[in-house]
Amino acid sequence: MLQLQEYFTNGPARERKLLSLFLTAGFPAPADTAPLLQLLDDNGADLIELGMPFSDPLADGPTIQRSSQIALQNGMTLRKVLQLTAEVTPRLRPPVILMGYYNPIFKFGPEQFVRAAAQAGAQGLIIPDLPPEESRPLQAAAVAAGLSLIYLVSPNTSPDRLQLVEELTTSFVYAVSITGVTGARSAVAAATVEFLQRLRRALRHPVLVGFGVANAADARLLASYCDGVIVGSALLNEIEKYGWQPAGRQKIAAFVQSLRDGLDIAQPPAV
């Protein structure tokens, strides 16, 4: 059984709603990434998605686009992300999942990349622009290296593709809450709740929902219909707003703790 599969089968997912947090490697500065990851761990993260910055992040909204551009300007590369991953994973409790786009991975060499990612301590990969229908070679290489490949589904995902994702999944399914790019939003649409209810009926694997989770209230509401939430843009906004000085760290820690608290009081949906 893969490490991340084991984490979902016998780990915290059986006990509580999961909090997965996204951070762009190299943002706001390369030296800040490791202490930020430790802060996320210390304040309740169950999973950490470490973004591999790319110049054309099609699925990402303005916040993550901006953080990626800053990280690239700071000199962050795929190899440096792998080096950083190798440095931090021994000290972190949550599994680390690398998230990025296929173009850099193709240039690196897909099989070489999955081996390097596994050696660095990553347990999974999220590649938003890799269609599941074309993922089998990378999926095979990832599983051989001990990595789970995580697939995204959205309200527009067809029943046939949903079935394929269910077949290929070895850990959890990433539910995109809205049709659009990433970014914190001010409200959770009723259509999102209906979508998550539909996934619950169609999938046996755990489902975590991302794109648009802005605060503890969103996390609490959405978690009632899935196994956890993924927060990226809202966290990056906090980091950009408050900075990485001691007072800023306290604000960021408080935000993460508020998400954790929101999930801990999430209630099962009414039947």
Image (cartoon, rainbow, N blue to C red):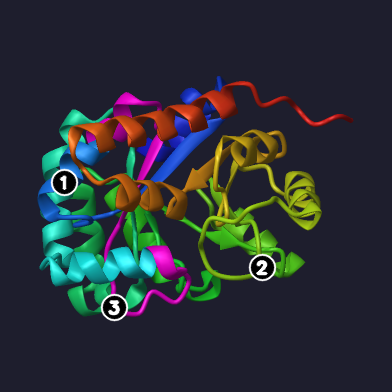
Residue under pointer 1? 32
Residue found 27% across the figure and 62% down from its top: 52
Identify the disc placed on residue 91. none
C-beta proximity under 8 Å, tags 3 and 1:
no
Label 1: element kind: helix
Q: Position of residue 58 (x, y in %)?
A: 44, 77
> On the image, numbered disc 2 is attached to which residue?
161
Classify residue 112 by image quadrant: bottom left
Which residue occupies the foreground of this view, 263 or 152?
263
Q: Can residue 147 be seen in the rendering of this structure?
A: no
Residue 44 belongs to magenta span:
yes
For the C terminus, the image quarter is: top right
Which quadrant holds residue 246? top left
**What's the mark number on residue 55?**
3
Which kind of residue does numbered mark 2 sit on?
Answer: Arg
* Residues in magenta, as a range: 38-63
Q: N-terminal of the two: label 1 or label 2?
A: 1
Other-residue count near label 3 (Cα within 10 Å), few / some / many at <14 / 14–19 / ≥20 = few
The verdict on residue 1 being magenta is no
Q: Position of residue 66 (x, y in %)?
A: 33, 68
Q: CA distance from mark 3 to mark 1?
A: 21 Å
Q: How many marks?
A: 3
The amino acid type found where label 3 is placed reads Ser
Label 2 neighbour load within 10 Å: few <14, some 14-19, many 20+: some
| Disc with the residue nearer the chain's start (3 vs 1) | 1
Report if residue 207 is visible in the image: yes
Classed neighbour count for the residue bearing mark 1: other residues with Cα under 10 Å, few (<14), some (14–19), many (≥20): few
